[in-house]
Image: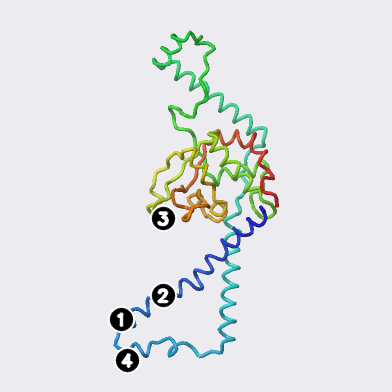
């Protein structure tokens, strides 16, 4: 199932641009030209510009060969483009043990800062006095709300880090990238990893890129998932997206340019993520 889905996503990434260039674009151009010819030119001039008049009178076999040749070239170019965009070079970073130590140290610093902030908060201090909590042993709960903005990592960079710790994210030999993204979706739904994105509500990319990064409600991931095709085919992180494959317009209501809480994602990647390997078996 995973192998079939990976193939379908690859074929879609390759064939849709080829179809647009070979059929959709020429049809749109010819339709516009025909409209101008028939509506604005004189009948005599329009008759001279009819397609059978100026189109080369080649045998049908020549047309078939030319069309198939163009299609093959576009498919090969599309495969090359998808292969290049799907390749994410590994990061020059330390080994797994060093990453785990860094994540643990960073988490401890965060807890110390959060504890200090709450101990200095008059409302928190009044609550502790009322409840009789010992300030020495008081430890804050790990709620998702913090007074400071967390450090974010974009999804493409997160996949590069996953490659460092042993995940095959190429999509060429197995479906591990789908396993990993399924795990990220579940972690986001559980509230383990906070995620951000830009609302996908503009037709123009320029306007979409100007949308602010906002935190994605965890319940979003009950219906939406990370679009594996967008992750593999996009040239930069802006193309990564969430979508609802059951909806008539899957991208409506989704987000672009996905980001994760860097610390939470690092801890999850070196812990719970391993359980998702093999979710999509080839």
Point out the tag, 4 or 3, that comes first from the N-terminus: 4
Q: Secondary structure at mark 2?
A: helix
Which dot, 4 or 3, sits closer to the camera? 4
- CA separation in Å, label 1 and label 4: 12 Å
Which residue is label 2 attached to?
29
Residue that appears at 48% across and 33% down: 150
Residue located beneath label 4 in the image:
44
Q: Is residue 236 above or below residue 79?
A: above
Where is mark 3, residue-wise? 205
Question: Which of pointers 1 and 2 indicates the residue nearer the eye?
Answer: 1
Is residue 169 rendered to the left or right of residue 218? right
The answer to whether 201 is drawn above or below residue 266 in the figure is: below
Distance CA(mark 3)–CA(mark 2): 23 Å
Mark 2, other Cα within 10 Å: few <14 / some 14–19 / many ≥20 = few
Q: How many marks?
A: 4
The first of marks 3 and 1 along the sequence is 1
């Amino acid at each position: 199932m995973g192998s079939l889905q990976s193939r379908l996503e690859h074929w879609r990434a390759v064939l849709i641009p080829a179809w647009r260039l070979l059929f959709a674009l020429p049809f749109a151009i010819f339709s516009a030209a025909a409209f101008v010819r028939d509506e604005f030119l004189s009948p005599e001039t329009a008759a001279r510009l009819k397609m059978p008049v100026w189109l080369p009178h080649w045998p049908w076999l020549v047309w078939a060969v030319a069309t198939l040749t163009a299609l093959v070239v576009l498919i090969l170019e599309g495969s090359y483009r998808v292969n290049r965009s799907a390749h994410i070079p590994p990061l020059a970073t330390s080994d797994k043990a060093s990453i785990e130590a860094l994540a643990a140290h960073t988490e401890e610093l965060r807890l110390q800062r959060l504890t200090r902030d709450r101990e200095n908060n008059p409302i928190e201090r009044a609550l502790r006095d009322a409840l009789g909590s010992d300030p020495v042993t008081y430890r804050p709960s790990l709620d998702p709300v913090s007074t400071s903005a967390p450090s974010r990592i974009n999804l493409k960079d997160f996949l590069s880090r996953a490659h460092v710790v042993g995940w095959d994210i190429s999509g060429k030999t197995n479906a591990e990238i789908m396993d990993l993204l399924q795990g990220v979706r579940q972690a986001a739904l559980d509230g383990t990893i906070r995620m951000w994105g830009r609302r996908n509500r503009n037709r123009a990319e320029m306007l979409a890129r100007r949308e602010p990064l906002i935190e994605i409600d965890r319940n979003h991931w009950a219906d939406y998932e990370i679009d594996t095709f967008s992750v593999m085919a996009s040239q930069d992180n802006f193309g990564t997206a969430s979508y609802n494959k059951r909806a008539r317009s899957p991208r409506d209501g989704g987000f672009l340019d996905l980001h994760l809480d860097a610390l939470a994602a690092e801890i999850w990647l070196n812990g719970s993520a391993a359980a998702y390997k093999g979710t999509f078996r080839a």
